[in-house]
Structure formats: C-alpha cells, structure tokens
Image (spheres, rainbow, N blue to C red):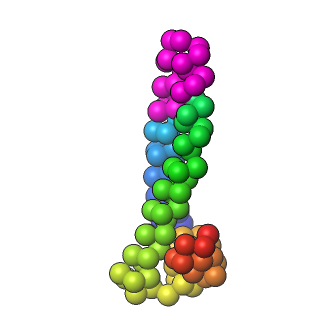
Amino acid sequence: MAEERDEAREAADAVLASVRAALRGLEAIPDAATRARAAGLVLREWPAERSLAKEIRQQAVDSLHVGQGLDFPEIGRLIGTDRSRAWRIWKGMD
C-alpha cells in the first residue's frame, strides 16, 4: 500500500507542478494592469477547478465501488482515509 501512496504522491506532484507552471504564465504578461486583471480572473474561476478535482475523485471512488465491487473500508484504505469519508466522497458530500 505504501507503493500506491508513493505513486499517488508522484502523480499529484506532477499535476501540481503543471498547474504552478501554468500560473507562472501570468507573470509573462507584460502589461501590469492586464496581468493583474488576468490573475483576478483566474482567482475568480478557481473554485470551479476545485470542483473538477472533487468530481474526478468522486468518479474514481465510484469506479472502485461500483466498477470493482470494493466496499468502503477497502476503498478508505486504498485512498488513505476511513470508510465513512470514502462513502461521503462517493455520495458527493465531501
């Protein structure tokens, strides 16, 4: 299981590095006013991107539960949480 967590950490780190690199693209905007407005727009849109990550996590838990037939204690162990949180993720409550 530690190996799975290492793979997840590596995958998350790679995605986060890409996100950071994309955000650093804001720094390349030469006009300060345009750069500030663009950064503000990104900040305003950010909650939707957080929702996307939650949807992806929920779909993955659904795949483990419905697709692979795992129960919530098993899912919780696989994703590093407890069974009740795994269930709440699956229901879209967390």
Q: Is residue 41 above or below residue 69?
A: above
Q: Position of residue 1 (x, y in %)?
A: 51, 71
Is 79 a magenta residue?
A: no
Residue 4 pos. (x, y %): 48, 65
Q: Residue furthest left?
A: 67
From which residue to which does the magenta span run?
Answer: 21-38
Q: The C terminus appears in which quarter of the rendering?
A: bottom right
Report the residue at 54% width, 36% height from top: 42
| Vertical arrangement, residue 71 with respect to residue 64, above or below | below
Of residues 22 and 68, which is closer to you in this image?
22
| Nearest to the observer: residue 40 or residue 5 | 40
Is residue 78 visible to us here? yes
Residue 81: horizontal and vertical position, in percent? Answer: 62, 73
Residue at horizontal 59%, vertical 40%? 44
Viewed as shown, does residue 23 lie left or right of 69? right
**Looking at the image, is 31 positioned above or below residue 38?**
above
